[in-house]
Image: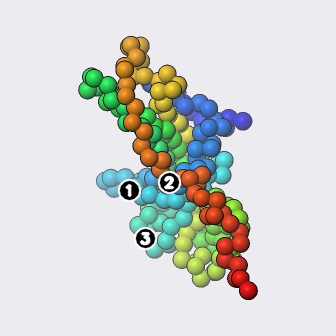
Amino acid sequence: MTPEYLDNVMRRTDLAWTDWPAIEAFLRDELICRVAVNDTPFPYVVPQSFTFTGDAFLIHCSRFGKFSRLIQEDPHIVIVIDRPIALLKAPKGQNTSLEYYSVIARCKASTRMQTQDVIAHQNEALGKFRPENDYTAIEPGAANQIVAIRCQIERLSAKKRILADGQYSPPGQPQAPYLRYPFERGASVSGLPDGAFDPHRFRRTK
């Protein structure tokens, strides 16, 4: 079911990505987002690993840094996740472009610092990276060093430009004779080998 927060009203209607199951799969597969928080006079942007839950992004950081301070001062943040797919070339210079997927989410962050809250947050986030559930419990001392951040999605927009879908630029003009040069696949959960999720990897052999 498409969530109410998906808002794809944009100038380039041909680039609007509206296939929610594909967007959701993309968000669950990607590893790194960029988070922009309010600062003066410039926004402060940091890369973060993340877990998408369906209605929020789970991230965390040190309790003692600038990012933690800024997000507690103003919880309104923007999260960006993107994946370049291919370089596109055509005879005209203005037709040099990229294929890509891109998601922008406007969120309101809530922070947790109580030990058990942080541990519960981290256990939920670990489901993306360790679905084999083979790890020992998170130690309270480690949890007490970080702040758990749940970024509730208020509005999310998604764009894609993939030639196979007939998305050419600019709209209304003849299709350019693009040559397509794919990039190597970037880091993603689905790109890991099966052994990365082996629940027996740490068991001692007798």
Residue at point 58%, 66% (across, down): 148
- The residue where tag 3 is placed is 65
Q: Earlier in the sequence, mark 1 or mark 3?
A: 1
In the rendered image of this protein, does residue 98 appear above or below residue 54? above
- Within 10 Å of disc 3 (Cα), the crowding (few <14, some 14-19, many 20+) is few
Considering every residue shown, the one lying at the far left of the view is: 93
Amino acid carrying mark 3 in the image: Gly
Q: Earlier in the sequence, mark 2 or mark 1?
A: 1
Residues 131 and 88: in front is 88
- Within 10 Å of disc 2 (Cα), the crowding (few <14, some 14-19, many 20+) is few
Residue 51 lies left or right of residue 39; in this view the side is: right
Residue 60 lies left or right of residue 137; in this view the side is: left
- The residue where tag 2 is placed is 187
- The residue where tag 1 is placed is 44
In the rendered image of this protein, does residue 83 appear above or below residue 59? above
In the rendered image of this protein, does residue 58 appear above or below residue 85? below
Amino acid carrying mark 1 in the image: Tyr
Amino acid carrying mark 2 in the image: Ala
Distance between the Cα atoms at labels 3 and 2?
Answer: 27 Å
Q: Position of residue 5 (x, y in %)?
A: 61, 38
Q: Position of residue 1 (x, y in %)?
A: 72, 36
Q: Is residue 125 visible?
A: no
In the rendered image of this protein, does residue 118 appear above or below residue 169? below
